[in-house]
Amino acid sequence: WQQAQTAPVPWQQAQTAPAPVQQAQAAEQGGAVPATPQEVQDFLMTNMIKEEAWQQFMEMDPMLQRMVINRGSLEGARDATAAFIGRMVSIKKAAKAMPPPMPTQEGLQNMQRGSLTSFDQSKGFGFITPSDMSQDVFFHIQAVTNGGNMDMVAGATLRFEMGMNERNGKTQATRIVLDRPGVGGGGGGGQGMDQMAAAFAGMMEWMWGGW
């Protein structure tokens, strides 16, 4: 009966558990470190998980692996493999809701320069004209680190990094830094609130979604 009195109730566990969004933000600020290969192996060896889940976990970004590990053991789960897969899905979803982190000063210097050509406010995407006048580059508002829809003013100068769209395999700008955020009067407010809401929704799903 003493154990029952001191054990935290579910809502207390939810409040004190480190949410993936909070962990990702802490990681940006140096408050967390990526999981090491040894930590990944140790976690897999101490939890009875099927090979299909092992493979998914091994392919995750080390910072996301850290979030998975930090949620603790799967001991007590009715189906450890299903619980583990659900854990990975919720963490990936919450991480995607966050805007990309600002680059370091060195990284900023290495980014390509360009200017905003056009932007569709209703769909949240637009195009960048590189400074070298090469082919225009597609981007989505979620790639912008320091602005929102209201800042997407044609002619605005910026820096960007290229990457690949995981869904269609096409190249696009995956991280954008505006030279003068807030020029459009938004200061990142509109899209920033959308991203915060999405991140909060992911956090709540993580807290209340069981294992």
Image (tube, grey):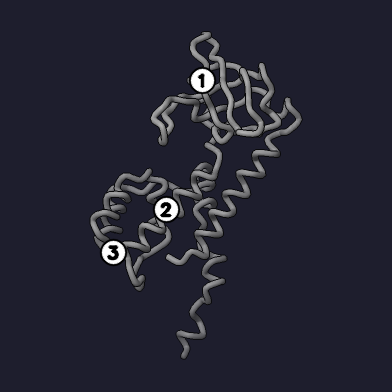
Q: Secondary structure at mark 2?
A: helix
Distance in Å between CA atoms under marks 2 and 3: 18 Å
Residue 164: quarter of image: top left
Residue 113 falls left or right of residue 41? right
Say few, some or many: other residues with alpha carbon within 10 Å of mark 3 (under 14 / 14 to 19 / 20 or more): some
Q: Secondary structure at mark 3?
A: loop
Q: Position of residue 149 (x, y in %)?
A: 67, 32
> Circle 2 is placed at which residue position?
89
Q: Position of residue 92 (x, y in %)?
A: 44, 48
User: Mark 2 belongs to which amino acid?
Assistant: Val
Res 106 seen here: no
Above or below, comparing residue 102 to residue 93 in the picture? above
User: Mark 1 belongs to which amino acid?
Assistant: Val
Residue beneath the point at 62% across and 49% down: 197
> Circle 3 is placed at which residue position?
47
Say few, some or many: other residues with alpha carbon within 10 Å of mark 1 (under 14 / 14 to 19 / 20 or more): some
Please tell me whether mark 2 or mark 3 is closer to you in this view.
2
User: Mark 3 belongs to which amino acid?
Assistant: Asn
> Circle 1 is placed at which residue position?
137
Residue 136 falls left or right of residue 88? right
Res 15 seen here: yes
Q: Position of residue 185 (x, y in %)?
A: 76, 30
Residue 204 falls left or right of residue 51? right
Residue 179: quarter of image: top right
